[in-house]
Image (cartoon, coloured by chain):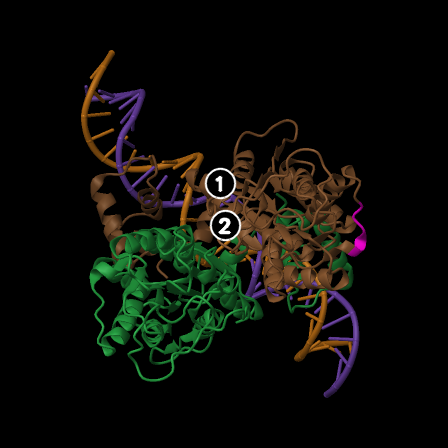
Chain colours: A brown, B green, C purple, D orange
Amino acid sequence: MATLSDVARRAGVSPATASRVINGSSKPVTDELRERVLAAVAELQYVPNAHAQLLARSHRSAVGVIVHDVSDPYFAEITRGLQRVATDQGRLLMICNSYRDPDRELEYVELLRGHQVAALILAGSGYHDDTFTRQLNEKLAAYEATGGRVAVIGRHEHSGDAVMPDNRAGGYLAGQELCELGHRAIGVVAGPRILTTTTDRLAGLRQALAEQGLDLPERRIRYAEFDRDGGAEATARLLDADPELTAIAALNDSMAIGALATLRARSLAVPQRVSVLGFDDMPIARDVTPALTTIRLPLVDMGVRAMSLVLGVEAPAPRVEVLPAELVRRDTAGPAPQAVQGTAGAAPSPRRGAAGS
Amino acid sequence: MATLSDVARRAGVSPATASRVINGSSKPVTDELRERVLAAVAELQYVPNAHAQLLARSHRSAVGVIVHDVSDPYFAEITRGLQRVATDQGRLLMICNSYRDPDRELEYVELLRGHQVAALILAGSGYHDDTFTRQLNEKLAAYEATGGRVAVIGRHEHSGDAVMPDNRAGGYLAGQELCELGHRAIGVVAGPRILTTTTDRLAGLRQALAEQGLDLPERRIRYAEFDRDGGAEATARLLDADPELTAIAALNDSMAIGALATLRARSLAVPQRVSVLGFDDMPIARDVTPALTTIRLPLVDMGVRAMSLVLGVEAPAPRVEVLPAELVRRDTAGPAPQAVQGTAGAAPSPRRGAAGS
DNA sequence: TACCGCAGAGAAAGCCCTTTCCCGCAGGGA
DNA sequence: TCCCTGCGGGAAAGGGCTTTCTCTGCGGTA
């Protein structure tokens, strides 16, 4: 690889001058030398060594992002929001997948710190694990102590800036909708028990049911991986244990899609026989058939806000932005079969055939 | 940020010793000093500066990857394959999204070269654009001249190692299937004209039709973005121009899903009234309803092979691995309505209700 | 004519590590 | 007892770049 001195030698100038030309420094250089340098760069196909540059400038510009999995639509959307702001500000993003492994998450914090990122964003559910939480907080605190900025998306762990989707309210919305549709036998297809997202959404759901005098016993909850296959499997177990279920609340859309697959395989009509509710409103939700009724979270916006927090002015006190969840009625949730409509108010009927939003 | 000398000073040793302890060098260090160093590291929360390390070791270990968009399932699957091999070999991946912008692609080649990656993998369709192709090849050649390894996935541009999905054969398979089902009025929902993937798949399709004496006029082809909305829009235009169409071949699954959305909105039954064929077999294909009949490409395997090529021994001659496409029959393709079954052989009936692959 | 100031270029000091090379010392063999 | 060997540790030389500081030479003013 050609180095800067190679270029300088070839152009017959000092490395200092070559550097100034290449980086468009404010220091003036005569046109003749400038052209000689540029010619040498082209001839040698010179590309500056990024590590040497980053080492020499103390300027920290990249931003580190830790997500569970970028190819998961939930994080893909958040990342889109992060990217948008980062690109606007000319920042490079380093994105790491933790695949929901706490240890890997810890490692990545170190790795990104070692790469001198200007800021760190952690997106995705936190864990019910005190040891881990303490370790993570220590690492984040150490990073912040050296001037690093940190923001989290959807996690309770960290005491600093945070963007929080209102998971609990979303769960409540889901429970409420199902109750209003007259469902009494409701099963929950939940993500891993150790994730705070799971318990938050579950708590909201439980509260909504409780307000209608309904209990949510553990046998009506199945915990599985937060993906399509986890949802399919959990739904199967749920139905095996309790064939009378008339509604299934999935704690994210991927699981809901798995649930639909299982229901289809068992020839249980959705929503006539069983209603299904998703969570997140990822893009594919409107394209499955029937289109998925779900709880929308402003995913892109969450990314935008988190990045803005972290690149904007530092606040004296930690800022927490709570973003609201919203019910999106599509075609997978309908009135409970032979239901005794117990609640006051009109049970909204599902809008069949509406493919949009 | 604490530096290595800070650690060394605190531990009362030389930076050399500290470095040896921290990196587990082969050179022996007495237990006492080792512990003092480790203690200092913990107290100072020391994390080595990655740029300095990378600069000091000449060892290039990371691998650069340029894809159109990781969050697109097509590339997510390929990336999964790339990751698998890279992780096994302890390599870090730097993944860049070009968002199908040739200029950005060129920039990323430079960027990754600057970051001293040991190898470069370009995945995703090439462009029908001679200027770009020449520029890219120049840059890749320059990189290879300095010892860099390069492999491409699904692109013709580069003369070196390549993993090629058999797009043309896949297109042929699609055309053949549709013909055998008795379709005569076939519309094509195609990706951008400038992409070689589009033209390759189209060429195979056209050949299959030609063998049945069928023409594929331009008015039966609509070019749009390679995504869901592009597919929906192209399908609408196709149907507007030619309401008698009985089959739509989409050139990827995302577009096929868009096509299904449009057909649903227009109450055209799939597959009774219109058949739909996808391409790629991305995971969601089996979960839409009806489940998508499509052409499968071994996406993960493509990633695995490309990474293996690039990390394995260098071959004297460029290697090209062509991976076969395969028809996956699900539920969106059926016999043409009122079709005159013109071809010999039994037209396979779609297997309804089979959700699995 | 003598001096000042400034523009434009180069010398050199880092940035933070790794690693080679060298040194001192202790133990073992002659 | 002396020398050689080898082990554990440190000094110092990079690695490739940026940037401050210094120097040279020129034009302009008194």
Q: What amino acid is found at the position of numbered circle 2 in the picture?
A: Arg
Q: Nearer the viewer, residue A110 or C28?
A: A110
Label 1 crowd (10 A; few <14 / some 14-19 / many >=20) = few
Image height of B337 relative to A18, above or below: below
Label 2 resides on the chain identified as: A
Please state the horizontal and vertical placement of residue A246, each as a whole percent of the image. Answer: 69, 53
Please state the horizontal and vertical placement of residue B87, each as a whole percent of the image. Answer: 56, 67
| For discs 2 and 1, the disc positioned in front in the rendered view | 2
Please state the horizontal and vertical placement of residue B322, each as a whole percent of the image. Answer: 37, 77
Q: What amino acid is found at the position of numbered circle 1 in the picture?
A: His
Judged left or right of residue A289, residue B23 is: right
Label 2 crowd (10 A; few <14 / some 14-19 / many >=20) = many
Q: Which residues are magenta?
A: A215-219
Helix, strand or loop status at disc 1? loop
* Pointer 2 or 1: first along the chain: 1
Q: Residue at x 63, y 45 (%)?
A: B2
For the question of whether residue B35 can be seen, the reply is yes
Q: Residue at x 44, y 75 (%)?
A: B349
Prevailing secondary structure class for the magenta stretch in the rendered image: loop
How many numbered discs? 2
Helix, strand or loop status at disc 2? helix
Judged left or right of residue B355, residue B264 is: left
Q: Which residue is mark 1?
A: A59
Q: Nearer the viewer, residue C14 or B287?
A: B287
Q: Which residue is mark 2?
A: A286
Judge if badges 2 and 1 mark residues of a common chain.
yes
For the question of whether residue B44 can be seen, the reply is no
